[in-house]
Amino acid sequence: MRLAILDSGHGFWAKALFAFIRAVSRQPTPEALKLIAYRPDFFGTHSKKITHEAMRGSSVWSVGDRELMAAFVSTANECDYCIKAHSAVSARAYQDAAKVSATLSDLETAPIGEPLRATLRLLRKLTLEHSVDAEDMRAVLVAGASREQVEDALAVAFAFNAMNRLADAFRFSVPGPDAFEAGAKFLLARGYR
Amino acid sequence: MSDIRDVRKALATRILEGGGRAPKPLRRAAFDNAGLSEPLLTLVDMVAKRAHAIADDDVAAARASGLSEDQIFEVLVCAAVGQATRQYDAALAALDAATRKE
């Protein structure tokens, strides 16, 4: 972390929670949790609600699909921490790590449905170019995604376009795969609340 | 359908209008990525456009300009949420345009 307050500036209860998580998971405190738990009244409390609703709220997209979108947006933003974290959750949700890695390495040949492929294409353009137009949207709708599905995907993109930037700006340190596996297990069981 | 409209507004209102260590006009400028001077001009624009390329020195420059860590924390949160908000709003407007009944 580039800011010492995000490593060690938390209050008593947050520190107690971190110690508990370290003991149970036998992994370091997740960097994302350190951010969310720092002065939660400023950012974390609302941010958690947004992420939980986008990732676990009612949607036609499965949890695996939405975690894949998170990993995909993170790939466009080149956010190593978030790519690894959400690839792990998506792989576990789908019970198919090959599908996740195939999608992140080549969207056009990945073994996924056309509505999801077109939606990911849209999210990549939005993330890289910061804007999309009606023509881009029509292409997704024609591919079979509903308006509601597009809105749900945009909610995922919002959450991760904010979080990727913060992970990189604050320089989340990237742990080994075991830590992300433990995190994925937790996020699938409990979500982001 | 998942619904983040209200909580997204609540987050923006909180970070821009609520209490904080950084002055409100500075938080607003970071959110808008407009009207800043160095070193925050560069740092906030990097958060918006290429956060992965931010280096320790970029954040150190903000600290050296006299900002506390809490102020930097707030400014960077505003910058990140601001850019994500512009992207989201642009996409929703495009979706509305694509689905508008003739």
Image (cartoon, coloured by chain):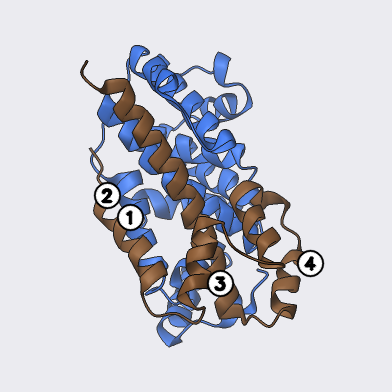
Colour assigned to chain A in the rendering is blue
Instruction: Kindly check if marks 1 and 2 are in contact, taking CB atoms under 8 A apart as contact.
Output: yes
Residue A157: image x %, image y %?
Answer: 44, 41
Secondary structure at numbered mark 4: helix
Give the mark nearer the N terminus: 1 vs 3: 1
Question: What separation in Å lies between label 3 and label 2 (alpha carbons)?
Answer: 24 Å
Question: What separation in Å lies between label 4 and label 2 (alpha carbons)?
Answer: 36 Å
- Please tell me which residue is depicted at 40% across the width and 83% down the height of the picture: A13
Residue A114: image x %, image y %?
Answer: 41, 15
Secondary structure at numbered mark 2: helix
Residue at image mark 2: B5
Residue situated furthest front in the rendering: B35
Find residue B15 and report its image quarter: bottom left
* Disc 3 with disc 2 on a shared chain: yes
Residue at image mark 4: B57
Question: What separation in Å lies between label 3 and label 4 (alpha carbons)?
Answer: 16 Å
* Disc 1 with disc 2 on a shared chain: yes
Query: Which amino acid type is marked by label 1?
Result: Arg
